[in-house]
């Protein structure tokens, strides 16, 4: 009996292996046609469908270092890097080894284990504004939980966010500026979100401290928190002035409103202590995701101990997770962070990226493009002599112009994230040689 079952399982496995070997024969458009039948839009996260750049999404079968390999077998220099988690590139050898080792220990316990403790201690020992933290499984979950803590701590329900910042698909933050932006009122930005939640969310423009001060002073008694991406990098790269963020910090302190830094994209990417360290701002709560899990589904929220102690079981704020702190993600994250620290990767990558872009920009600018960057995060956008700190400052027609460059770059072996509003990432695996090769492709793509 057992033998029959085992044989059946073995046959099934080898059939599956054949299907995956068979991927060499399949192509992206056949796979997408199949995917459309079983998943909404054929994808599991909207940008992957290539809607904003047009055409059929590409399917990839493997990745190594700075490169992706499509199911057709073609290799591409990858600047999407899974939208940010891969600080070291795909399947960094040291992280791979740790992951393999962990697979032999356990996949998940749903119980206490030392691996999350090691990652938590590593972070708390080094990041002064994180006195305690809790691991979750995505950036969205981290933000959602941080807001719950802020509301519990203040007994207030409203939250102020900024136009041009993204915080995951948390209901109360899927908001856009309402018609009455004058009073900071929000409107829902997704179907299925209760319109009542719009009353809990206020929206302010980036880079306008006077406006923010006005809204905060008028609403202080209702506001639990201000949440901001200190490096807004989800609608292009809208680098803020330090004075703006310092000003926000002092307004929040003065008015007794909690300041939440959403560092899901910037945390452990631009510096060990994220933007908070670089700006010397001390947020009350901070959210992480992406790099913290080294490419596995990990998020975290943390901050002041008195606030984090409100979380169950030490306090009344309920938050839990079946797969929270899974050992594979914990150890991949820690291996990534330890390697980044020991090799000085944060500053080295920032230098490498800035050298690359300095060499590349003159040729792009001749054709009306340019790249902005902060650390290893970059954004290809239409040339203008002004810095872009708010989306409204973006030259018109950006998304349409980006389409052409995106497809031309793909033809030349470079994969950018499939939207003109997504940023790119330089990882440790992008050697100067690979970056120079990418430069030639990109210049050729804008010159086509
Ligand atoms: C990616 C991102 C999120 C959402 O994280 P998920 O893991 O996709 O849920 C939230 N905030 C910021 C700033 C992000 O960049």
Image (cartoon, grey):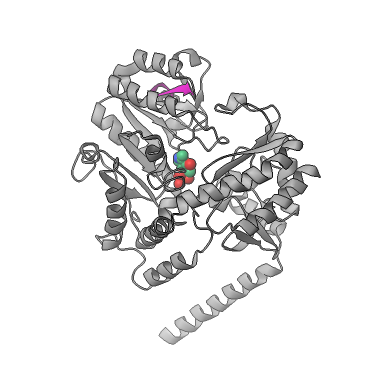
Q: Quadrant of the C terminus?
A: top right
Residue positioned 37% across, 40% down in the render: 277
> Please, what is the dominant secondary structure of the magenta stretch?
strand
- Indicate the quadrant where residue 406 lies: top right
Asked whether 391 or 375 is in front, the reply is 375
Residue positioned 29% across, 32% down in the render: 150
Residue 1: in sight, yes or no?
no
In the picture, measured across the screen, residue 110 lies left or right of residue 271, that is: left
- Indicate the quadrant where residue 379 lies: top right
Q: Quadrant of the N terminus?
A: bottom left
Residue positioned 30% across, 34% down in the render: 284
Q: Percent position (x, y) of residue 2?
A: 41, 84
Residue 428: in sight, yes or no?
yes
Asked whether 420 or 318 is in front, the reply is 420
Q: Find the residue positioned furthest to the right.
A: 448
Residue 234 is one of the magenta-drawn residues:
no
Q: Percent position (x, y) of residue 264?
A: 43, 43
Q: Percent position (x, y) of residue 304?
A: 25, 38
In the picture, measured across the screen, residue 117 lies left or right of residue 176, that is: left
Q: Find the residue positioned furthest to the left.
A: 314
Q: Is residue 59 above or below residue 270?
A: below
Q: Is residue 39 above or below residue 159?
A: below
Q: Percent position (x, y) of residue 350?
A: 52, 47
The range drawn in magenta is 198-205
Asked whether 436 or 48 is in front, the reply is 436
- Indicate the quadrant where residue 213 lies: top left
Count numbered badges in the picture. 0
């Amino acid at each position: 009996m057992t033998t029959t079952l085992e044989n059946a399982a073995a046959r099934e496995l080898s059939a599956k292996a054949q299907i995956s070997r068979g991927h060499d024969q399949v192509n992206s458009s056949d796979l997408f046609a199949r995917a459309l039948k079983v998943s909404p839009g054929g994808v599991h996260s909207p940008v992957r469908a290539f809607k904003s750049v047009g055409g059929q999404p590409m399917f990839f079968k493997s990745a190594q270092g700075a490169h992706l390999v499509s199911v057709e077998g073609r290799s591409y220099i990858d600047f999407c890097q899974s939208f940010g988690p891969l600080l070291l590139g795909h399947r960094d050898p040291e992280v791979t080894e740790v992951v393999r080792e962990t697979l032999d220990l356990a996949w998940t316990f749903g119980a206490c284990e030392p691996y999350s403790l090691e990652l938590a201690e590593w972070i708390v020992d080094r990041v002064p504004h994180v006195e305690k933290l809790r691991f979750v499984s995505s950036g969205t979950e981290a933000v959602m939980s941080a807001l719950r803590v802020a509301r519990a701590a203040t007994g207030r329900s409203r939250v102020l966010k900024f136009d041009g910042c993204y915080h995951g698909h948390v209901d109360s933050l899927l908001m856009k500026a309402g018609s009455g932006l004058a009073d900071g009122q929000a409107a829902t930005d997704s179907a299925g979100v209760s319109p009542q939640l719009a009353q809990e969310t206020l929206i302010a423009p980036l880079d306008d401290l006077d406006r923010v001060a006005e809204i905060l002073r008028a609403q202080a008694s209702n506001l639990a928190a201000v949440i901001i991406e200190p490096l807004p990098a989800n609608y292009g790269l809208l680098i803020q002035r330090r004075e703006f963020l310092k000003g926000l910090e002092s307004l929040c302190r003065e008015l007794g409103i909690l300041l939440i830094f959403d560092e899901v994209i910037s945390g452990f990417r631009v510096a060990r202590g994220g933007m908070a360290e670089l700006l010397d701002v001390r947020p009350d709560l901070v959210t992480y995701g992406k790099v913290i899990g080294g490419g596995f589904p990990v998020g975290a929220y943390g901050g002041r101990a008195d606030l984090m102690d409100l979380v169950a079981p030490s306090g009344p704020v309920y938050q839990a997770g079946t797969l929270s702190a899974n050992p594979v993600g914990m150890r991949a994250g820690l291996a990534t962070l330890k390697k980044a620290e020991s090799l000085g990767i944060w500053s080295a990558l920032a230098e490498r990226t800035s050298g690359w872009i300095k060499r590349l920009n003159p040729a792009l600018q001749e054709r009306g493009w340019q790249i902005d960057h902060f650390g290893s995060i970059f954004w290809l956008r239409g040339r203008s002599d002004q810095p872009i700190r708010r989306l409204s400052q973006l030259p018109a027609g950006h998304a349409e112009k980006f389409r052409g460059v995106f497809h031309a770059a793909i033809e030349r072996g470079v994969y950018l994230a499939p939207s003109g509003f997504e940023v790119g990432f330089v990882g440790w695996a992008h050697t100067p040689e690979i970056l120079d090769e990418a430069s030639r492709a990109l210049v050729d793509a804008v010159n086509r």
